[in-house]
Structures are given as C-alpha cells and as structure tokens.
C-alpha cells in the first residue's frame, strides 16, 4: 500500500513538473553511461532533482537516487515519506559535528548496490547572482573512494525563476536540463584541480544569458 | 445533419486530402534523397507535415466538442504561448506575484468572459484592468530596477498571448443573421487562410525566392514568397466563401487583410526573437519550433478579422 502511494506520488510530481516547466532534456553527444554513475548538477530550487529525474529515461530513472540533507527531509512525517519512499533519497547529515553516519560511506554503499546518484556539489541552494557556488569537497571524496565511476555534469536552467526561495506558487516557465559527456577523476589528480575541472565542465553547459543578441 | 456540420465535414476531408498529398510528397522526397545520406531540409519538412496532422486532428476534436472544446483548446494555447513568452523576458523576483496572477487569474478570467459571452468586459479586461493592476502588484515589492521594462514586457506578453489569441474563439460569440450555428466555420476560415498563407509563402519562397524582403529580421522570407503566398492565399480564401457569411469578393478581401496582418505579425515576432537572441520560441512542435512560431500570424490577424466581421456583419 505504502509503495503504491509512493509510486503514485512520484508520478504526480513528475507530471506536475512537466506541466509547469515543459521540461526538455538536451543529451550529450555520446549518450548517457548505462552503468551506475553520479549526476552532478547546479542547485537553486527544491524541484531540481525532480526535473533531472523527470527527464531521465525510465530505465535510468529507476536506478537514480538523489542525495539530500537528512536534517531537512526528516523534519516531518510527510517530508520523510517524500524523501525516503517517494524519491528513495540517500539522506546524509550535513552538519559535521553531530554526524552519526559517514555521508561518503552512505553514497558508496548506494553505488555498490547498483544505484546512480544525483548530487548537488554546491551543498546548498544557490541564492546568489553567481551562476555557480564553489563546490564542496564531497564529490572529490566520493570519487577518491570509487575512482572508476562516471561523473555526468547536468545543468538545470530556469528552475530558480519558476519558484524562487520563499514563494509558494510556481510560475510556468520553460526549463531545460542539459547533460554533458561523462568524465572521471584522473590518476593523482589533486582536490583543487579536480573540483575546478568539474565546476568548469558544469558551467560549460549553461546557456548564454538572455538578450545577448546575435 | 445540419449544413454547418456537413460543410465542416467537407472541409475536413479537403484538409485531409491536402495533408495526404503533402505526406506523399514528403515520402517521395525522403526516398529519393535517402541514398545521398541524411537530409536536414527533407527531415524538417516531414517533421512539419507530421506536426500538421497532429494540429489538424486536435483542432478537429475541439470543433466536434463544440464551444467548450474550442475555448479549452485556445486557453491551453494561450497558456503554452504565455509560458514561452515569459521564459524570454526580463523578470525579477519582485514580479513573482504579477506573473503568477497573469497565468492563474488573468488568463482564466479572459476565457471565462468568453464562455459567459460578456463582450463588454472581455474587450477591455486586459487592456484596462490588467494593464493597471499588474504594475500595482509588482510595485508593492518595492524593486525599481528596470521597472518600466519589466511591467511593459509582462503587459505585452498578456496582450499577445492571451488578449489577441482569445479573439480566435471570440468569433463564436458573434450573431450573424442567416449564419446561426455556423460560427465555428469562421474560425476554420481564419486559421486555414493564415496557416496556408504561411505555408504558401514558404513554398513560393523555396521555389522562386531570390530577393530577401527583410534580411535583418527573417533571412528566409523573400519578396517572391511574400507576393506568391499572399496572392494564392487570398484566392484560396475567396474560394472558401461558401463556409462564410461573405460573398466571394468579400471573402477575398478579408483573406487579403488576414494574410497581410499575418505576414507583418511574423516579422514583429521575429524581431522580438532577434532581440532576445533566440532562433525559436520553444520546442513544443517538432519541426516548427515553439507554439508562438506557429501562432504569431494568427495572433496578429485574429483581432482585426474579429472586429471587421463584428462591425459589418454581426448584430451583437
């Protein structure tokens, strides 16, 4: 029963997201990896992973699990149900001091079980005018533990305008989700070089700002 | 079966005939050029023809469903068009409530007024009430950055995508003596003439186009395409007089006005796209681009056609 409600809720979320944003995926030249991988995306709205999830082909969607903050999703019964059962999120504790579980271990376990992860390496929603916040080091620690996993950059465009922080009514706007070609960590690549390279790969997918003419 | 539905049936068969003919040409072209490898122009042509089938069938279903069907179809068109338009304009967070009310208050009210046949308020609701109230909603947030541009763009989006577009189904509210129960054919006349004019301008341009008519706005439009398209669409419009309350001559004159407005509407909307730095309004219709790419000429001709018919033919 609980599973049925969860599946129904998931379908409803996807349908709603599609009706509001008419979301369209732009695929990379060489296609998506079929093995479990890590999708890393820019983060500006709660709806971000729903959009990524909505555009993934059903086979890949089934194995994709968003990585989200436990403190946020375990706040109430409803949000726990949505986080755990509907989206099957890997819930990690973001505050270092009161951690009971190691986030990297949770993520590698999920990958080892055959899941893909949807990760937001900025760590929090971007409310600034900058296109991207500096990445937290989690992505680096994850691939240090699993160096052969493919990393797929994913740029989510326009969703921050659909529902800015603090608003409750979404504005219908067309969103795109652009997937880039997969990359991996190079042998002996340092943390700063790796994070810089992944940030650049993600920013390269961002469309040019509106009204810049031709 | 009354005359309206039998005329509609004849029309539908005629359109299906044209589409079957077009599909056959597309099929032959694809087969002939298949050896030469993938051909983007032929693929695009076939995608366009396929999309035409879907659009004709959708409009057909709406016509069969009657007044409610037509209103719902155009309300959805307005919604999708407004979504494409607002995606490309300069909005700021302070416009959130204004934009939300454009989609979820103004648009439904405009179509409700059509349903209730309240012509007096329908005709001024967006140009007067939305015009005054939307900037008030925006100004309450106190953000003055690019304020004039923002409120002007939202109003323009509403005028084009909701107000002008709603004048197509508004044709159903007219009362023309001797034409009772046949108003849906007026919509068919308008849409067929506008869309055929677009298609024929494209065909004439591809076949004989040499002189660019507006190189800065729309590099694919040519003088030959424009003249050929307008003349042939006007003649087809005149030959469709039997579905209208007009004489053949009047039908031709109206078709001419519709095609001219449609052509310049296309130019204006091209200029807006250039300004925003995009090639298409969206990706809703495969091969055509966004919904506004298909609707731009209809939007510019519908209110003029509506008012000419209302002034000289209608009692209401």
Image (spheres, coloured by chain):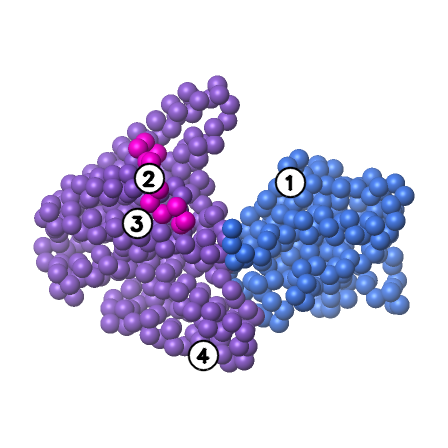
The answer for how far apart the CA atoms under marks 1 and 2 are is 39 Å
Asked if residue B67 can be seen in this view, the reply is no
Q: Which residue is mark 4?
A: B136
Q: Are marks 1 and 4 on the same chain?
A: no
Please tell me the colour of chain B. purple
Which label is found at residue B263? 3
Which mark lies nearer to you, 3 or 4?
A: 3
Q: Residue at x 51, y 23 (%)?
A: B37
Please tell me the colour of chain A. blue
| Chain containing mark 1 | A
Secondary structure mainly formed by the magenta segment:
loop
| Chain containing mark 3 | B
Which mark lies nearer to you, 3 or 2?
A: 2
Q: Which label's residue is closer to the chain start, 4 or 2? A: 4
Which mark lies nearer to you, 1 or 2?
A: 2
Give the magenta part as a residue range.
B206-217
> What is the x, y in percent for residue A175?
56, 54
Q: Which residue is mark 2?
A: B211
Q: Residue at x 35, y 30 (%)?
A: B23
């Amino acid at each position: 029963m609980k599973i049925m409600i969860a599946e129904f809720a998931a379908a409803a979320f996807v349908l709603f997201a599609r009706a509001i944003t008419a979301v369209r995926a732009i695929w990379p030249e060489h296609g998506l990896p079929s093995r479990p991988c890590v999708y890393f995306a820019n983060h500006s709205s709660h709806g971000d992973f729903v959009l990524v999830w909505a555009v993934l082909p059903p086979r890949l969607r089934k194995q994709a699990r968003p990585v989200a903050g436990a403190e946020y999703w375990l706040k109430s019964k409803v949000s726990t149900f949505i986080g755990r059962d509907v989206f099957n999120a890997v819930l990690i504790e973001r505050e270092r001091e009161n951690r009971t579980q190691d986030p990297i271990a949770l993520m590698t376990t999920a990958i080892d079980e055959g899941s893909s992860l949807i990760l937001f390496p900025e760590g929090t929603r971007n409310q600034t005018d900058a296109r991207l916040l500096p990445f937290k080091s989690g992505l680096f620690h994850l691939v240090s533990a699993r160096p052969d996993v493919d990393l797929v950059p994913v740029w989510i465009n326009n969703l921050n305008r659909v529902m800015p922080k603090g608003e409750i009514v979404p504005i219908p706007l067309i969103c795109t989700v652009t997937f880039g070609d997969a990359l991996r960590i190079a042998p002996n690549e340092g943390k700063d070089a790796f994070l810089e390279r992944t940030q650049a790969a993600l920013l390269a997918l961002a469309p040019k700002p509106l009204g810049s003419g031709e | 079966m009354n005359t309206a539905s039998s005329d509609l049936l004849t029309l539908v068969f005629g359109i299906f005939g044209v589409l079957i003919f077009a599909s056959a040409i597309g099929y032959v072209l694809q087969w002939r050029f298949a050896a030469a490898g993938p051909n983007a122009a032929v693929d695009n042509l076939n995608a366009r023809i396929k999309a035409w089938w879907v659009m004709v069938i959708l409009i057909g279903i709406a016509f069969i469903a009657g007044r409610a069907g037509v209103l719902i179809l155009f309300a959805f068109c307005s919604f999708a068009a407004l979504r494409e338009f607002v995606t490309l304009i300069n909005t700021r967070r302070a416009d959130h409530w204004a934009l939300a009310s454009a989609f979820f208050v103004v648009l439904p009210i405009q179509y409700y007024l059509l349903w209730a046949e309240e012509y007096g308020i329908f005709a001024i609701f967006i140009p007067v009430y939305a015009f005054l109230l939307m900037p008030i909603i925006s100004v309450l947030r106190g953000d003055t950055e690019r304020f004039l541009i923002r409120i002007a763009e939202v109003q323009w989006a509403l005028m084009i995508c909701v107000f002008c577009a709603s004048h197509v189904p508004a044709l159903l509210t007219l009362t023309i003596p001797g034409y009772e129960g046949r108003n849906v054919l007026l919509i068919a006349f308008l849409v067929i003439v506008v869309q055929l004019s677009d298609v024929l301008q494209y065909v004439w341009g591809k076949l004989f186009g040499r002189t660019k008519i507006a190189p800065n706005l729309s590099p694919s439009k040519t003088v030959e395409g424009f003249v050929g398209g307008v003349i042939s669409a006007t003649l087809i419009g005149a030959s469709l007089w039997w579905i209208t309350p007009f004489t053949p001559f009047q039908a031709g004159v109206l078709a001419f006005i519709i095609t001219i407005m449609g052509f310049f509407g296309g130019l204006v909307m091209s200029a807006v796209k250039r300004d925003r730095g995009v090639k298409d309004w969206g990706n809703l219709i495969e091969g055509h681009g966004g919904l506004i790419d298909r609707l731009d000429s209809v939007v510019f001709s519908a209110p003029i056609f509506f008012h000419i018919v209302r002034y000289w033919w209608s009692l209401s």
